[in-house]
Image (spheres, rainbow, N blue to C red):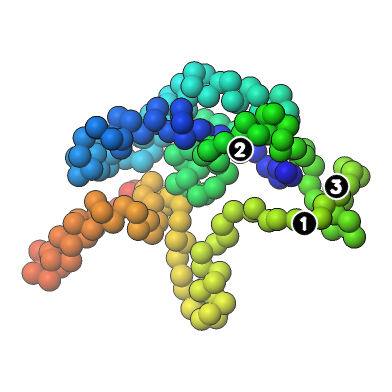
Amino acid sequence: MFQRSSTYIMTTKEGSPHLMKPLYWQGYPPTEYADRIANATPIYFNKLIAQRQTAEIAGETEKTVLDGLKKVGYIITMGDDGSGFLFLALKRAGEYYLDVGACQLIIDGTIKIKGNTQIERFTKTGLKFTDGSELQANVILYATGFGDIRDPIRKIRGDEVGDKLPQIWGLNDEGELRGNLTWSRFFSKHVALQIKAKQVGVFGERYSAPR
């Protein structure tokens, strides 16, 4: 496996419970209460909490896995300012792997790792890298993550429509996530109240962060 850039690693067996158990886990508060608690603080404030959780996970539950990956040359990141999974998901929707077993295969050498270079070009038998090395391969599988979600819309409707589309993912200047349908469970009620307020003529000026 060729690793183009660093990756944040968290196992679903150890890391995920450490991160999610206070709210979203079997036996913990009902979802409606968990949603309310989770959304009670601004995202950028949650970053401070995420930094602490990420440090705890890396130093306790995931230390053996992370040390093993580093020994075989896997490039690890702790995320945006050490905030781990949360802000990589919110800002990029990528650069992380929630491990379900592949990490141990990498550590054991079953999956070989190549990194610290970039692909220069394809060859008749595989890949050539910018450091001069070559890798023989019968099949090359791309695992480059998600592109801009607006690109397929642009292909279907053209640049005239595509140029009008706002960014659909990532955090805006106020720290709010753009276009996240997964939060509709909680925020759809607020949107409905705003629509009703506009219909009856009592909707005031929208708050916006000072620039």
**Residue 168 in the figure: left or right of residue 127:** left
Q: Which mark is residue 102?
A: 2
Q: Quadrant of residue 50?
A: top left
| Residue 139 drawn above or below residue 67 | below
Question: The residue tagged with tag 3: helix, strand or loop?
Answer: strand
| First-in-chain label (2 vs 3) | 2
Q: Residue 144 placed where, x, y %?
A: 64, 53
| Residue 66 drawn above or below residue 111 | above
**Residue 166 in the figure: left or right of residue 123:** left
* Mark 3 lies on residue: 135
| First-in-chain label (1 vs 2) | 2
Q: Residue at x 46, y 31 (%)?
A: 13
Question: The residue tagged with tag 1: helix, strand or loop?
Answer: loop
Please indicate, yes or no, whether residue 105 appears anywhere in the rendered image.
yes
Please indicate, yes or no, whether residue 121 appears anywhere in the rendered image.
no
Q: Label 2 is placed on what type of residue?
A: Ala
Q: Residues within 10 Å of mark 3 (few under 14, many from 20)?
A: few
Which label sits in the foreground, 1 or 3?
1
Q: Residue 170 placed where, x, y %?
A: 46, 52
* Mark 1 lies on residue: 139
Q: Nearer the viewer, residue 48 or 59?
A: 59
What is the C-alpha distance between the residues marked 2 and 3? Answer: 21 Å
